[in-house]
Amino acid sequence: MQLLGRNASMAGVQRVAEVARTVASGVHSDTAGLLSLAEVMVEAITIGMESGLGGLSREPAESALAGLSTIAMKSFDETSDHADTAKRLGSTVASGVQALGDAACSLASESNAVELVSMQADGSGISVHCHTTSLATTLVDFSVGAGRRLDECGATTVRRIDYHHMNIYHWATSGPFQVPENASLTDVEVQHCEESPRIIWIDINGFQVKIEIRI
């Protein structure tokens, strides 16, 4: 944490992300080491999003995404002997990417969608897309006769995260069924009037499975 403390700035967050990515690229058979790097990345993203720094800007966000993408790809080289650590690693990477999705949404406007992309030559990688649209809605309570206006909503925000040929939950199994490591995942969240349904798509060679989680 000392490294992060000394780099509590946009340039510092980007520097930490670049160092973590470089270290992760050279890691072999060390799930615990990858987990430590992922935790450092998430902490750097959290620091970057603090209001005192004005929120995470685009360049350090892209560096952080590249670092998390590298860590996720290296995790596929590990063995099943580290299942518990692999689960924590996948969850940590996912939380970091979701935080970057929030950062992208904070940068987006009605006239300007924001996309962060980290792709490998083989087509694998992670992309984050966020855009907002104006969709004014008035909520009315009719339980008291003529009705009473409760709230008025403005913009709707759509956040989409794609894990291209990268199943970060490759450690998970359900009986005889297991989603392969090269499956593509899509995580979509729609925010409107404090309603936030989350949808996860799993694409396995063109066969899609949809899971909706309402939070």
Image (tube, rainbow, N blue to C red):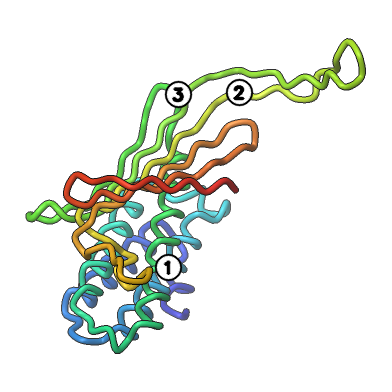
Occupied quadrant, residue 86:
bottom left
Label 1 vs label 3, nearer the camera: 1
Real-space Cα distance between discs 2 and 3? 11 Å
Left/right placement of residue 50 relative to residue 113 reads right
Q: Name the residue at the top extreme.
A: 146
Q: Amino acid at mark 2?
A: Gly
Judge whether 202 appears above or below 114 on screen: below
Judge whether 88 appears above or below 163 on screen: below
Residue at 30 percent across and 52 percent down: it is 185
Q: Position of residue 97 (x, y in %)?
A: 39, 56
Q: Which secondary structure lies at badge 2?
A: strand
Residues 125 and 86: in front is: 86
Label 2 vs label 3, nearer the camera: 2
Q: Name the residue at the bottom extreme.
A: 81
- The disc, 2 or 3, on the residue closer to the chain's N-terminal end is 3
Q: Name the residue at the left extreme.
A: 121
* Crowding at mark 3 (Cα within 10 Å: few <14, some 14-19, many 20+): few
Q: Are marks 1 and 3 in contact (CB under 8 Å)?
A: no
Q: Amino acid at mark 3?
A: Glu
Real-space Cα distance between discs 1 and 3? 31 Å
Q: Which secondary structure lies at badge 1?
A: helix
- Residue at which label 1 appears: 91
Q: Which secondary structure lies at badge 3?
A: loop
Occupied quadrant, residue 159:
top left
* Crowding at mark 1 (Cα within 10 Å: few <14, some 14-19, many 20+): some
Q: Position of residue 64 (x, y in %)?
A: 33, 59
- The disc, 2 or 1, on the residue closer to the chain's N-terminal end is 1
Residue at 28 percent across and 45 percent down: it is 208
Real-space Cα distance between discs 2 and 1? 32 Å
- Residue at which label 3 appears: 110
Label 2 vs label 1, nearer the camera: 1
Q: Which circle marks residue 154 in the picture?
A: 2
